[in-house]
Structures are given as structure tokens and as C-alpha cells.
Image (spheres, helix red, strand yellow):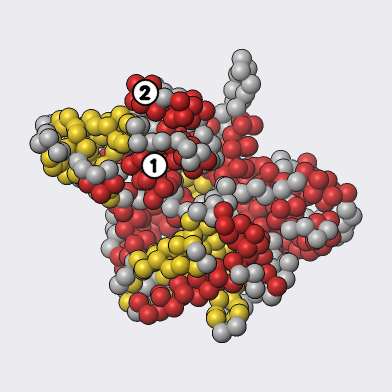
Amino acid sequence: MELVDFLRQTQTEVRTEIADRMGDTGDAYPYPESVFAEIVMQHMAEIGMTFEPKVCHFEATVGRAKLRLSGYAISEDCDQVDLFVSLYEGVDEITPVPDSETKTAASQCVAFVNGCAGGQLSKKIDLSNDVYPLVINIQDGYNLIDQIRIYVLTDCRAKSKNFAVRLVQGKTIKLEVMDIERLHRHWSEGKPRDELTVDFTQVSGGALPCVYVPGETSDYDYALTVIPGEALRFIYEKYGARLLEANVRSFLSVTGKVNRGIRDTLRTAPDRFMAYNNGIVLVADELFLGRTADGSPGIQWMRGMQIVNGGQTTASLYFSKKKDSSIDLSQVRVPAKIIVLRSADSVQEEALISDISRFANSQNAVKLSDLSANKPFHVELEKLALTTYCPDGVGRWFYERAAGSYNTMLARDGSTPAKLKQLKDAIPTSRKITKTDLAKYMNTWDQKPHDVSFGSQKNFERFMEALTPPEGQDAPPLPDVATWKRMVAKAILFKETQKIVRPLVPAFQANVTVYTVALIANRLGSRIDLDRIWNSQAISGEMKQLIRTWAEEINRVLLSSADGRMVSEWAKKAECWQAVLAASYSHPIGGSPEMR
């Protein structure tokens, strides 16, 4: 797909989402840049460039400085913060954006950081503001933050993708631009690897000694090497989860988790690390051979480097050193097997990477069962989604078992503009359900709104734990067509609730949405005909009115029961759910067609 076609596809996605949110009101959506920001941030989270993203629209003036923010993401340990500011024009042709504009947007975001760190901003904004938790996080934990990155998101084409770092009260802040061209490159490649280039002459002082085996008839070359522990730690510090293949990232969703055996070896016997550790498996798009100091063959640099096995080893090196500065990585060596990809077919290439990941991980600590995308439950849902048509006999819902598979499907099957339009009409993005989406819908319906409020990754972990039977017991039966249809019905109810809540309450809309759906499941779940929702592919006006009424009442209950605490934090507690259940709500007026 050409860049201009990708731009128009993105604009269609933004406009469709805006139309869905506004419904039949006929009003103009106040913040289209927030919708664009949400789409881009979610993409960046899926490929490991950022953490759990939260959308907000914030503008303020502190002194003479103008502050702007469109969203943010915070790491599990609250030691890394990503901030996003959106420059959205809504254009359908490739349009350049001057560096002066992207720099201004970045500067307004830097001013936001400065206002938080200096304590001025917390005095100016209300406790109920969506951005307040971030302000307090930065203000109270500024000294503990290791990294702050600012991304300018734009649907235009930027000349510069990176700017010089800024210093704010002793912290280095990195500034990057995610423009439509960079976003298209990620989308069309189906991977974030294109931006990962590692020069070992810089990170480890010289080329890495290696054994290199060129592939004569295969679609890959092969190399064996040993990577210094400090070099691997530095690479992970720079690229983080982007370095890890998507399935491995899912396994390592709690990024601060340190393998105790690895940590103990690093502390007591770092020189024996290579003897004790199985090493890592990498894929790369390109590898350049040079010479080591003694003249033997060596790897000078790699482009498109990604770890498909050994993510736990790599992350543990980083976090062990971070948590214990006395650990000396200078003696640590990590064996590495490198697969250099040579296939011209991107679909075949990604399939090869998936197979390498599966078979490499099945032999080591990260078993096949740990790679959630390959669990039979998710594989079966993908099959059901591919073969189950909506009542009109044309449309389908899409289950995105592996991150990016929806876009891969569009690129593969939408080979002409007409075919692409037909595909997107039959399976629009509004009918895409990711694994984390499904976990959110199911756990909400199962009346676990406090789990869902922890965010998509933690909630997904708990969802998967509930699907995993105790040792010695049989796994639950795989879902069938009827189950899939009812899952989609729950998704429809959730999405419709989300649309109603967004313009209804000023803050903490995600929490209000989740608790409203959970209350419906608690009070009315046994009486709601999910098959009817599937057949209608919508909910009735009576149900929408009930949602509107209960959402307003739940918003008041959440605010009052929080008793001065941050609502988003209070919502994570089981006690919050008990408080919501104990409150009184308006009785449904009239019967909804969905009610049995």
C-alpha cells in the first residue's frame, strides 16, 4: 500500500471512530486529534514502543508557558514515562509539517514536564481531571524516573524524526516524531524492527567474533556469536520491549520481573554466566561482517535486530543491574544464535519468525504454553471469527490473535483498491477484537471491573490465569460458534456503553464504562438475550437509555466512595466494586427488547 493510500485509510479509521462516538447527535467532535492520538498510541503499544497508553486532552498556561498533552504511558515500575502530543490536520494528501511546528508541540510537552516536576501544575488542576494522576506521579517520583520520552504524533510528513534532547531539572528528555511516514513504515513492514540498528563497534568496543554460515538454498543465513552482558543491557535500555518479538513480550508483560537464578549468577559467578545460560536467539534483517582486533570475522552491526528467545535473560540483565548497582556485567558473556532473514515475502518472513519463536521457546524456560497467542483458546477463536458471518451474510468480526494480523490481512487480501474497500466494508476496524480487548469484555461481564481497571496487560494476565486449569485437571472445552457470537454480543454492549459514557462524564470515562457494564451483568445479566444482540448487531434505544442513566449514577458513586482518593486507583480495589453494588440505582423504565 502506498503512503497516500495508507494516509487515507488512517483518516477513514479516525472519521469512522468519531462518527461512532458521536452517534446521531449531529454535533462536531471537539477533539479529533485525540482520536488520532489514541489510534497511533495503541499501535505503538502493540509493537512494544510504549506502555499502556491513556488518552487525555490537556491544555493550560503556567506563567508564560503554554502546556499541551494528548496522552501518556507509564511503565510498570513508574520509572519510565512517555508523553504524547498530537498535531492532527485531517488531510487526505501527503502534507509536510514544518520542523518549527513539531518543535513547538514538543516544547509545549516539555513545559508540561517542567510544570509537573516543579509542583506548579498540581496546584492549578482539579483532582477530577484525567491528567491529574500523571501530574502527581511525575511530581512525587521525579527523582526516581529513569527515562522520559516525548512523541509528537502527526498525520503530516515531518522532515526531522528526532530532535536534540532537552534537560528539565536534571533529567534528560528524548524528543521524537511519529509522523504518517514513520507510521506507514511500521504498518507496511508489519514489524518495529526496521528502526533497530545496533553498531557493536560502539556498544561493545569492536566487532563480535562469530561463526557465519551463509544459506545457499534457504531463506536465511546463520551466525553464532557471544554478546557482552553490558552491551546487551545497554541495547535493552535503549530499545526496551521493542527488542522482543511480540509473543515473547506477552510472556514478559511484567517487565520488572527478574529471574532469580540469573540474578544470583550475576552476583556470585558472572564469569560462569555463559556456561550456565542457554543464550538467546535473534533474528535480523541485515548483518554486516567486518574484522575483530585479531583479524578474524566479526559482526560489526545488525539492522532489524529482534529477540525471539531469551527475552527473560535480556530483561533480567537489565533489571538486575538496575536494582543492584554492585553487579558487574563486564565479565558476563551471553551466547547468541542469529538468523539473518533473506525472504522477499513479508508474510513468509513473519511466519518463519513465529516458527523460530515457537520451536526455540518450546525447548527452554518459556514453554509453548506461555506464548498466549498460540494457546488453543485463541487459535480456535481466530478460526471461528474467520468462518462466522454476521446475520447479513456479508460482514464478519475479526479476532486479532497476533498483533498486526488485521493489517496483514488487509495488505494480503486487499490487493486492489476495490478488494480493499470490500474488505474494509465487511470487516471494519470497529469489528476488530484484540486479545486484550476480549479479556476486557469478558472480565467486565464476569463482574471483575476492579481487575479490568488495572489496565489491559494486567487484566489479560488474570484472564489467562482463569483459563488455565490447575495441574492435573483437564482444560475447559474450546469455544464454539454460539460462544463466539455471545462474546461478540458482549463486545457490542461494551462498545455501545463506551460511546454513551464518553460525552457524558468529564473524567475517568474508562472506569465508568467498565463499572456500568459490570453492573448490567450483575443486575440483568441472566435476563439479557445475547443472541438477540448478535442478530441485531446493536442494542436497543431502551438499553441505551438505561446505560445513560446508570452511568451517571455510577459516576457519582465512584466519586463519593473514592472519598478524596484518585478514582482510577480506587477503581482497582474489590472494595470499590462492593461499594458500587451496595448503592441504589434507578429502576429500568419499560422493557428493553434484549430482556427476556
Image quadrant containing the N terminus = bottom left
Given residues 217 and 150, the one toward you in this image is: 150
* Residue plotted at (36% across, 46% down): 235
* Residue plotted at (65% across, 47% down): 454
* Residue plotted at (79% across, 49% down): 576
Q: Position of residue 501 (x, y in %)?
A: 69, 63
Given residues 234 and 135, the one toward you in this image is: 234
Give the number of the disc on residue 233. Answer: 1
Residue 119 found in image quarter: bottom right
User: In this rendering, is residue 369 above or below 508?
Assistant: above
* Residue plotted at (57% across, 53% down): 144
Q: Position of residue 69 (x, y in %)?
A: 55, 70
SS of the residue under disc 2: helix
Q: Identify residue for label 2.
A: 272
Residue 258 shows in the view: yes
SS of the residue under disc 1: helix
Residue 352 found in image quarter: top left
Q: Residues within 10 Å of mark 2 (few under 14, many from 20)?
A: some
Q: Residues within 10 Å of mark 1 (few under 14, many from 20)?
A: many
Question: Viewed as shown, does residue 257 lie left or right of 24?
Answer: left
Q: Position of residue 470 (x, y in %)?
A: 63, 21
Residue with the most extreme top position: 472
Q: What amino acid is labelled 2 in the image? A: Arg
Residue with the most extreme front position: 326
Q: Earlier in the sequence, mark 2 or mark 1?
A: 1
